Image: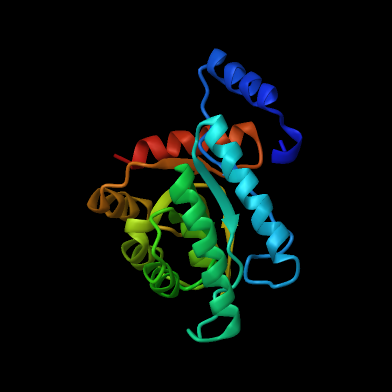
Amino acid sequence: MAPTNLTATGRREITHLLRSHDLAISAINCPLRRGIDVAVDLEPRLDYIRDAMTLAFDLGPRLIIIPIGKIAEKEDSPERNMLKEALLNLGKFGDRTGVIVALDLGGDDPAIAVDLLAKLDTGSLAVIYNPASLAVAGRNPHDALRALHRRVAMVHAQDARRISPNRMGAVPLGHGDIDWLQLAADFTEIDYRGWWTILADDRAEAKASVAFLQRVMP
């Protein structure tokens, strides 16, 4: 599925195959060895991301997911400025092609991410919301959602539980400490209508996770 390996014919065949099974792609995941906050080989990484954006357009989702790396807290730092330039470059490409770049923030401070994106003149940058990643990082998932809501392009439905006094870890959906009923109310409040993605280790866990979401979400 590497963009450079998939010809136009191959892309059409994949699209036809998906439609024949009544399936759709929600997003293209674009893993990177380094974040776009790292100067080493940055331009080839940006080229790769743009190729993935073109693939996302051809296959239908018009949404790609990339790891953003660490957002430097100091606004005028070289790392922050480099990240801003890279994001603006991708955002402008997305504006031209109609593809959204969703940033996987991990456990980064949502307020810093919102502040960073607000300073970029593009409408094609969004974020992935994962309550488990936020909880593991010691952040409040509900406050984070309220901060990010206008930027959320997709939700990774994952749970987390405290496994020691000072540590939390990801667990199957519905088996953790996250208040999903409160999250359901939060999502209703912000009128979220995007995709929910199940992160599961096997078919049984995925099936149980879907059933859980159907019970608790509007």
Report the label total. 0
Task: Find residue 192 and report its horizontal and vertical position in percent.
Answer: 31, 47
- The residue at the point 62 percent across, 32 percent down is 203
Q: Is residue 30 above or below residue 162?
A: above
Which quarter of the rendered picture does the C terminus lie within?
A: top left
- The residue at the point 60 percent across, 42 percent down is 200
Q: Is residue 202 above or below residue 74?
A: above
Q: State left or right for residue 201 relative to residue 95.
A: right
| Residue sitting nearer the eye, 107 or 80 | 80
Which quarter of the rendered picture does the N terminus lie within?
A: top right
- The residue at the point 48 percent across, 43 percent down is 97
Quarter of the image for residue 112 reads: bottom left
| Residue sitting nearer the eye, 56 or 133 | 56
Q: How is the rendered protein coloured?
A: rainbow
- The residue at the point 48 percent across, 84 percent down is 75
| Residue sitting nearer the eye, 18 or 48 | 48
Quarter of the image for residue 20 reads: top right
Task: Find residue 81 and report its horizontal and vertical position in percent.
Answer: 54, 78
The reply to whether residue 105 is in sight is: no
Task: Find residue 156 and report its horizontal and vertical position in percent.
Answer: 50, 49
Farthest residue to the front: give it: 96
The reply to whether residue 180 is in sight is: yes
Q: State left or right for residue 205 relative to residue 176.
A: right
Farthest residue to the top: give it: 20
Q: State left or right for residue 196 relative to residue 34.
A: left
Task: Find residue 69 and report its horizontal and vertical position in percent.
Answer: 61, 68
